[in-house]
Amino acid sequence: MKELDKEVTKNNIVELNEVFKHFGEIAALDGVSAQISEGEFFSLLGPSGCGKTTLLRLIAGFEEPTKGTISIDNSPMFKVEANKRPTNMVFQSYAIFPHLNVEENVGYGLIRLNLGKEETSRRVDEMLQLVDLEGYNSRPAHALSGGQRQRVALARSLIMKPKVLLLDEPLSSLDKNLREQMQVELRNLQRTVGITFILVTHDQEEALTMSDRIAVMFDGKIIQIATPQELYSRPISKRVASFIGEMNFIEGQLLIDEKGKTSVEAGILGKMDVNRDQIAVPLDSGLVTIGIRPEMMSLLFEERDRTEFEIGGVIKESAYFGDMTYYTVEVSGLNSPLTISMRNTSGRRILENGESARIGWGSESLVILNKT
Amino acid sequence: MVEKERVLKINKKFQIFAYAYLLFLYLPVLLLPIFAFNDSTIISFPLNSFTFKWFAGLTEETYLHESLKNSLFVAISTSILSTCLGILASRASARYEFFGKKSILSFLILPLFLPEIIVGVALLVVLMQLGLALTLWTVILGHTLICTPFSIAILNSAFANMDMSLEEASLDLGETRFGTFKRVILPMVTPGLISSILICFTISLDEFIIAFFLTGTETTLPVYIWGQLRFPAKLPGVMALGFLMLLLSLLLLSLFEYFRRRTNRVIDDQVNLEFGNLFKS
Amino acid sequence: MDRAISLFDTDSKRGLSLIGLPFGFSLLLLAAPLILIFFLGFWKQDYLILERSFSLDNYIEAWTEPMYRDLMLRSLGISASVTFATVLLAYPMAYFISFHGGNRKALWLFLVTIPFWTSYLLRVFLWKVILGYNGVLNSLLDWLGLIEEPLTFILYNANAVVITLTHAWAPFAILPIYVALEKIDRSYLEAATDLGDGPLKRFFRITLPLSMTGVVGAALIIFIPTIGDYVTPKLVGGKDGLMIANMIQVQFMKANNAPLGASLAVSAMGIVTMISVIFLTFNRRWLRKRGS
């Protein structure tokens, strides 16, 4: 938590204050506030239609907010057009100018700066080197592969030395392997140049692996802003929890004793102590939902395996994923079966349907969420 | 195999029909060179000997030269004017949503569906009421009116096929709106512009009715030809002239085809699509 | 994203300011003249002086005088025949190009359009040469021994006008029908075959209804303008093939009776518009019946 405090004291490069955007009757953004720090890799994560791209376009200056303010580098951006903002954008389609070659694309924005031929081509070369495209200068736009287009788009934006680089689903059109490779490269590139990146994505894995912080958006609102670990292990609602991976939900009762110690009572699972930071609801909520990730529970294969809590169940279904196996386990007394994932280590067998098994977990991996 | 043979048979039938229809379409065009080189003042079979004299005769027709000059002036002005109007209209249509868009656009392409005589007569009445003299400029106005729909059709898809993020990318990289138009939009629609100019030029050059109603003392080429058709002795000369005009049209058409193919690598049968789009409403 | 359009947002303003000039141009040179000609029909002309008093006389004359009525009916008949013939011939051609054109589609379309870049006047005139008493067609038939006497029913009458116009409007039918056929997803046809339709049934159940937009577009773009054709009837129509446009021209340029000419023009336009609307409605109903 100390570290987080340090983050906050860093300069805010983008400040969003109660931003609304309406398209006719439809509210694409419904009061969004956030601070994004200098040098941060910040992701806007959400399902399609949640307003994340609209928010990015507002920051870029392609749209004006209906209400609310946006400042970038401490200056308000009201009525500042996209071409006057210290931001640059990598488009989802990459928007590589089809009538220009690589060099002309990358140097597009420099023309207006009147740097002279030599300086321009020096900077272009430098950028092409940075994105691993040296020697591609005169390659025409239509002869570029998807990955190369993306690199050109990055170079073309970074050459402008923006305060903030905006990336609109930049990896969505790449195939899986290339996407994973580009995730690493993009992350490294961001560390090298030290520029704030704001990434829009609907892919939670992408957001988790690349970002310093993630803002989860639903229905035009930011629901939670957190680091990847925090977001994954301490989601603040059932919806966030299920959007970021999978989670078991169990009904329970939140209790607080006279000393202020908190615990949950979950029927057959018994009473489990929980810390305040595990609780995302008011303490007097009463009925709550207890959430636990599939990999935070385990099937106890050996007699001597011990965990803080355990209960018996019957395997209903198993799905084999190579490195992992996902089990659906029926526990009598629970409304719905539990999903449990187990790593397939050497010597560990896959349990058969109908086999009985012991399920174990620790109270520190629970999160207490709202009932609905 | 039986199925395949049947398909081939059907294909064959269609092919025979297609060639027969093509012959029907080319019949008059094929006659043009025949009579242009035939050494006889009577336009009918049997043919006489081969001659170039009708072409030579064209050089002495001062009226022809005048009207050719007039027609070129009209066609060039028309093609530029209608292309400019076409740029404005199709850019607005492709890029912006605005109040009454559909009605305004349908109104702009209305001349395509109107009999030209109606357009000609209506314009004539207005000009007479305003007391304006009939000059080549009145012809240009009429021609611009009927050429603009074609220009809009050609340019519409050129503008519509342009990814909007290209413009945004340009703005994003610091370019102004005007600079974006100059450096991104214009180069990308240039082939479309040239196509539009060529098509409007050709239409205007060949247009008769409106010119017939709206010319004053200076006649255009089709009006000149119309006059000549009444004199049998002039007909072979007219054939020769028609043949030359056909060659010019073919040259322009080939140029048009060339630029059409360059307009957009992605869209192949663009003009046909454009043409089809006119009927969507 | 669905956007409600108001007059005042930036998009609307930019769009309107761009389209303002062409729109203004059309208002001034098309809308105003059309409105004026509508009113002109109610006025009177005495030699060169227009008398601006409201009267229905011209319209009554245009609709009751047998000469004008016959002319109007003949014009409509010719337009309808031309439309029918052109579409009937163009459809198989478009179908051939679209379905059997292979990689030569562009070439075929190019070939189809080339003849129409010959001067329109000369094309019509050359039909006169082809169809004439000593014309190409009669010479050919005579040479083949198929006829004793030259055929006379093909020139200087309505037939000649229909043949010539069917030729003149060919690309305007081929192109829209071709585009409509091109837009048909070929998997629909495969699905129909898969579901047991033979080629003919498939054509009437899938291809024709789906290409109807092209046919309707072609029909309208031919039917409406041909009613106003002046050159063809004048050159090849003789006395019996004249159309309403020739009379309009006479009233305006020769008889100095612009108001009567205007009332004839407005009536002709009104009638074709009405027929087109009826045609569109029926077609829409037919398609809907097919669809359900």
Image (cartoon, rainbow, N blue to C red):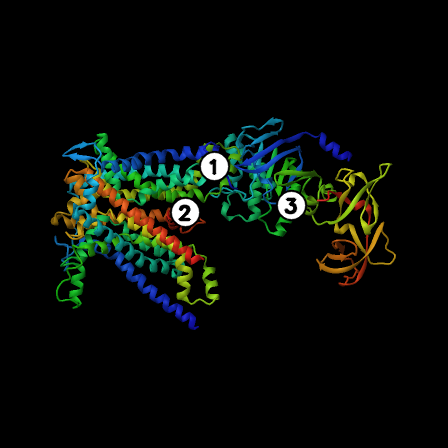
Assess whether mark 3 and mark 2 are in contact (beta carbons under 8 angstroms).
no
Please report the residue visible at 69 percent of the width from the left and 47 percent of the height from the top: A242
Please name the residue that numbered disc 2 is placed on.
B262
State yes or no: discs 1 and 3 in contact (Cβ < 8 Å).
no
**What amino acid is at disc 1?**
Ile
Taking depth in this image into account, of B145 and B243 the one nearest to the observer is B145
Q: Is residue C248 above or below residue C125?
A: above
- Judged by depth in the image, the label closer to the viewer, 1 or 2, is 1
> Could you tell me which secondary element the residue under label 3 belongs to?
helix
The chain identifier of the residue carrying mark 3 reads A
Q: Which mark is residue C5?
A: 1
Q: Residue at x 83, y 49 (%)?
A: A270
For disc 2, the chain is B
Choose top left, top right, bottom left or bottom right for residue A305: bottom right
Quadrant in which residue B214 is drawn: top left
Between B227 and A298, which is closer to the camera in this rendering?
A: A298
Query: Is residue B83 left or right of B116 when viewed as pictured?
Result: right
- For label 3, the residue is A183
Disc 1 chain ID: C
Q: Amino acid at mark 2?
A: Arg
Q: Is residue C167 left or right of residue A245?
A: left
Q: CA distance from mark 1 to mark 2?
A: 35 Å
Near mark 2 (Cα within 10 A), the count class, few <14, some 14-19 or many ≥20, is some
Task: Same chain for labels 1 and 3? Say yes or no.
Answer: no
